[in-house]
Amino acid sequence: MNIPLSVQRYRLVSLSLIVSALALLVPTVASAKKVACRPGIASVVLKSADVRFAVSPCGGGVESVKLLESQFDMRTDRTPKAVPAWAADKWKPGALELVGTWDAKWDPFRDRLIDLKVGQVALQVREPNEATATTLTTDNLDGFYDTDARWGVVHQSDDSVTLVWPDPQRVKSPIYLSKRYTLVKDRSRSLDVEIAVWNLGDSPAQFKLRHTISTWSDPTVEEGGLFAMLAGPPDLKSAAFHMADETVHLDINALKDAEPSEREAHGTPKWAATDSRYFILATLPGKGWGTGGGVAIHLHPSGVVESIVTSQGEALAAMAGGCVPAWYAKTWGGSSCEADFKRLGLDHRPHAPIDAAFLDKARIGAQGADKATVEAAIQRVQRRQVKAWQSQIYAGPKRIDYLRAIGGDVEEAIDFGWFGVIGRPLLMVMRFAHGFTGSWPLAIIILTVMVKALLWPVMGKSMKSMRKMQLLKPELDAIKKRLEKEAKAKGLDKPDPQELNKETFALYKRHGANPLGGCLPMFLQMPVYIALYRTIYSSVELYNQPLFMWITDLTQKDPYYALPVLLGAVMFVQQKIMPNPGGDDAQRKMLLYFMPIMFSFMMMSLPSGLTLYILVNTVLSIVQNLWLRREETQTKTA
C-alpha cells in the first residue's frame, strides 16, 4: 500500500515528539539534586596503638587523624575561627588532630575517577526508604560524583574497611570504584590501601584515577616572620612530592608565585604529601600505578593545599559473562567472584590477578561433575574486567626514624635547609642525648656543648686574631694620623690610599697579625650553626615537650618572654667583653646595645627550644673569651 508523502512526514514528526516527551519523563544526572552527606553520615574508625583514623563514606577519604601518643595530648582548644560549630570537636583539647579540613570535598586521601568514557549509561537509584528504583541517564558518569559522593561501606572489621562508589546498596551502575583501608601491624601510623575499578557493563570504559591529599591554611592569617629566610613559621602548610631522587617542596607562600613547571611533573612519584613543619600526610603509590601518570601541587583561594597523583590512562573491555563482587551480587544479583574463588581454592581479593598456571592446575584436579563447575568458575574469573592499584599512606609526626621505616625516601620531607648533610647527624646526637638523660632541654644543652667543643679551636683562633687586631688598633690610628698630617703638608685632602695600605700591611706582618684571621674561622663554622639551628627548629621530638615551669612546649615561644630578655642581657655581656678589632667608638656602642635588643625581639616570637640553644651558645662563647684572656694574661706574666 502506498502511503502519501505528507502522511509519512506527519507520522515521523509525531514519533519524534513522543520520544522527546518520554525522554523528559526520564531523569538525568544533570537534573538530580546534589546530596549533602556531612554532617550526618558517621565515619568508620580504624584505631592502632598510636593513631585513630576516621574513614569517611562522604567522598571515601580520611575525615580525621588523631595522634594518640601522650606527647600529642593537647591542653588547649585549637579550633580555627573559620570552622563551623558542627566540626569544632576535632580541635578540642585532647589528641592532636592532623586533618586541617572539615568539608568532605577536601578530605585527604580521597580518590575519584576522571576522564571517564563509557558512553551513555542508565543508573538505577533506590534509596533505603523507597520501594522502587529511579533511573538516571547520563553520558558523564564521573560527573555523577559531583552530585552524589556517598560511598557504601560494604565491609568493616577492627583492622579494615572497604568502601564502594557509587554505593552498591543504593545504586546499580556499570562502573564501580572500590577502596579498602587496612591497618599495618608493624607500622602503626600507616594504612595499606587497595583500590579497584570494576566494569560490570556491556560497554568498554576508559578512565584515570585521581588521588588527592589535602590540608588547609587559613588565608586570613598572615604567614612569615623575621627569620623567614632560614625557617618559616611552625605551621606553614606545604605540599610536596619526590621523584627521580629530587624533592619538590612548596609552602603556601611559594605556591602563590610558582609556575606550573615548578609544581608539576610527569610520571608517578615515590611519594606525595601535604605537611606542616612537624607533621605529614603522605601517600606512597605502589603496584598498578605505572609510569605514565603525573603529579601536581595546587593552592586554592580558600587556603586548601593539595598534592594530586593521577594515574596513566586505563581501559577495561565490556564484561560478558564474568563474575561480580559479592557486594554487587548481594543487591543486584550475579555470580560473585568470592564464591568462584572459593570453588577454585583461592583466598584472594576479588580484584586480584590469578596466575594461569594455577587455573590449569585447577582444571586438572577437578573430578567428575566438578569439572563443569570448576570450568564455569574459571571462565567467569577470567572474564572479570577490573583494574587495581596499591598504595600506602602515612599520617603522623615527621620523625626521621618513622619516615625511614615506611621507605620511599619520605624522610626527605624533613627540611634541614641547605646543610642537611650536617643537620641529620646533629639530630641523631640530640636524640642519643635524650636517650640517656630523658630530658629534651638537657639534650639541647648537651648538643650545643658538643658542637661548641668541636668548634673550640676554630673559634679560639678567631678570638685570638681579633684580640691581636684590637691591640694593634692604637698603632694603626697613629699611622693614619701621621699620613694625614703629611698629606696636609703637601696640600692634599687625604693620604695616599696605597701608602696607607702598604704601611698597614707592614704593621700586620711585623706582629704576625692576619686581618682575615677573625672572619674566616667564623665563616667556616656558620654552616654548622645554621644546621644546628634548623635541626632544633625542625625537630618534632620537641613538640609539646616542656622546658621548665611556665614553658610547656619547646616548639612555642616563651609566653612571658623571660628567656629572650635573659638572652639579651647575656649578649650585652658578650658584646662588652668581645674583642673589637676595628671601628670607632660609635660603632662599638651601637653593637653593644643594638645586637642584644635586636636578638631579644627576634626570640620573642621564636620557639623556646631555639632560644635555649642560642642562650647556651652565647654563655659558652663568654666562657671561651674569658678563658682565652686568662691564657693571655698567664703568657704575659710568664
Image: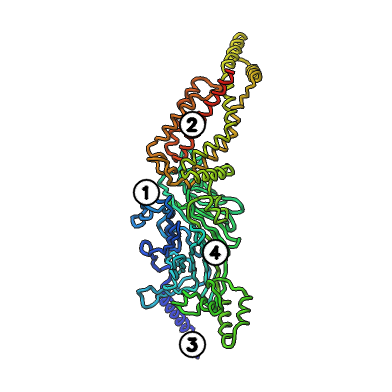
**Distance between mark 4 and mark 1 Cα atoms:** 38 Å
- Cβ–Cβ under 8 Å for marks 2 and 1: no
Of helix, strand and loop, which one carries label 3? loop
* Residue 531, horizontal then vertical, whole percent: 55, 40
Task: Say if mark 4 contacts mark 1, CB within 8 Å.
Answer: no
Local packing at callout 4 (Cα closer than 10 Å; few below 14, some 14-19, many 20+) is some
* Viewer-nearest of discs 3 and 4: 4
Q: Nearer the viewer, residue 60 or 521?
A: 521
Judge from the rendering whether residue 546 lies leftward or rightward of residue 420; answer left or right: left
Mark count: 4
Dot 2 lies on which element? helix
Tell me the residue that label 2 is attached to: 619
The mark nearer the N terminus, 3 or 1, is 3
- In the image shown, does 498 or 516 lie closer to the viewer? 516
Mark in the foreground, 2 or 1: 2
Quadrant housing residue 367: bottom right
Q: Residue at x 38, y 64 (%)?
A: 42
For label 3, the residue is: 3
* Precedes in sequence: disc 2 or disc 4: 4
Can residue 320 be seen in the rendering of this structure?
Answer: no
Dividing the image into 4 quarters, which one contains the C terminus?
Answer: top right
Residue 601 makes an appearance in the image? yes
Disc 4 target residue:
390
Label 3 neighbourhood size at 10 Å, few (<14), some (14-19), many (20+)?
few
The CA distance from mark 2 to mark 3 is 110 Å
According to the picture, the residue beneath numbered tag 1 turns out to be 75
